[in-house]
Image (cartoon, helix red, strand yellow):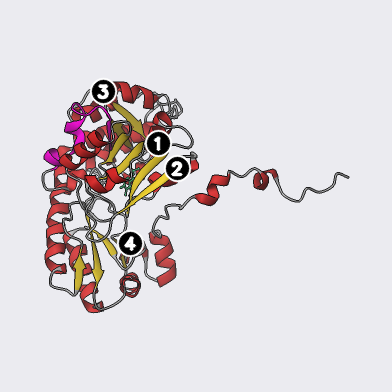
Amino acid sequence: MKEQVQTSIFKRHRNPNLGKVRPYIPGPTSADVSAKYGIPIEKLVKLSSNEAPLGPSPSVREALKKAADSDDLHRYPSSAMPKLRAAAAQAIGLLPEQIVLGAGSSDTWGMIIRAFSRPGDEVLAIEPSMTSYLEAAVLLEREPVEVIVKSPFEVTSQAVLKSVTARTRVVFLSSPNNTTSRLISPETIALIAQGAPDAVIVVDEHYIEATDRYRDVSAVRLIGELDNLLVTRSLSKMYGLAGLRIGYAAGPAEAIATVMSFKPKWNVSIIAEKAALATLAANDHLEANIKMTREGRSYLLAELSKLPVEVVPGAQGGFVLFKPRTRSGDEVTEGLFSRGYMVRGDLVKDHIRVSVGTPAQNQGFVQALASLL
Ligand SMILES: Cc1ncc(COP(=O)(O)O)c(C=O)c1O
């Protein structure tokens, strides 16, 4: 009998980059929290993933019901999805050839890294911010570079450009930044792009629609002016489709054609396409989600200012980051979970990130927090 091999091929040839990665850890699911705290799922208030307070538009639900009865579910989707590219492009004033679709905007990050860098090149991201940018970079054998910004977490062009070297090929900026909720102004983005002409600047605008003046502060309008800029947009947040996985990257047509070569052929499903077309046509619902988010954010900021907490200034996303003054962040997070309020207390040391919910959810959260402080 053949001698038993000590380690499997899966261990011997496991990609060594896995050991270097700091994986993004999603927050617990409602089912996890329900089981841990013995709270029925329907009583939990999920303010941990910045999802749209009103969810998807009724027209999305209609489109999904129709899709269930359609006769094309066993057919492959179009790889290029021209209709959806055109609708996404129209929503932000660009041309269809300036859009590449992903199963969520996060699906495009690896495509972009592979399209514009080689193993060993540097990929830069802000800390604190979404850790998945550098997770993708490390798994693709790029060198991760973190630009650490300290409280109150303003991202300046000087701080970013100090870390840019001749080997920097991709720079990820999140605006408004998850997790601080602070915006990076178009002026700052332009300075970074001009100061790093040999790097592709990717602005992740997953929550831009929730900002007070989103058409003015979006980097999309810089796409024609700067030749090294890409913007990623999501239908997960204000459009309410997080569960369906759809988003896109936008940029100069030439850059997008290159990214398209790295797109998995059928990454977006027919179902997601139909839901996306419906949501992009549902402007009133988008505006209702935006209005509720902006008003809820103002309410939370006003109420938090009366409590013993330090709020990170300039919140513009559908979430707010704050630090309790009288108790540790961990204690307060635990107290909120045990009262049924799901938040993130594990992203920035001592801080708690709370998503904007419906008015009733926001009020309940403020009461729960006040009782803990
Ligand atoms: C900054 C940021 N970008 C993108 C995403 C994910 O976007 P998508 O659902 O479009 O992949 C998240 C998820 O929370 C995020 O925090």
* Residue 189, percent from left and from top: 21, 40
Which amino acid type corresponds to the residue marked 3 in the rendered image?
A: Pro
Residue denoted by label 3 = 96
Residue stretch in magenta: 214-232
How would you rate the neighbour count of disc 1 (Cα within 10 Å): few for under 14, some for 14-19, many for 20 or more?
Answer: some
Spatial separation of the CA atoms under disc 4 and disc 1: 29 Å
Residue placed at 33% from the left, 28% from the top? 100
| Residue 167 disc label | 1
| Residue 143 disc label | 2
* Residue 297, percent from left and from top: 16, 58
Q: Residue 271's quadrant in the figure?
A: top left
How would you rate the neighbour count of disc 4 (Cα within 10 Å): few for under 14, some for 14-19, many for 20 or more?
Answer: some
* Residue 289, percent from left and from top: 18, 48
Question: In the image, is residue 155 above or below residue 344?
Answer: above
Question: In the image, is residue 174 above or below residue 312?
Answer: above
Residue denoted by label 4 = 348
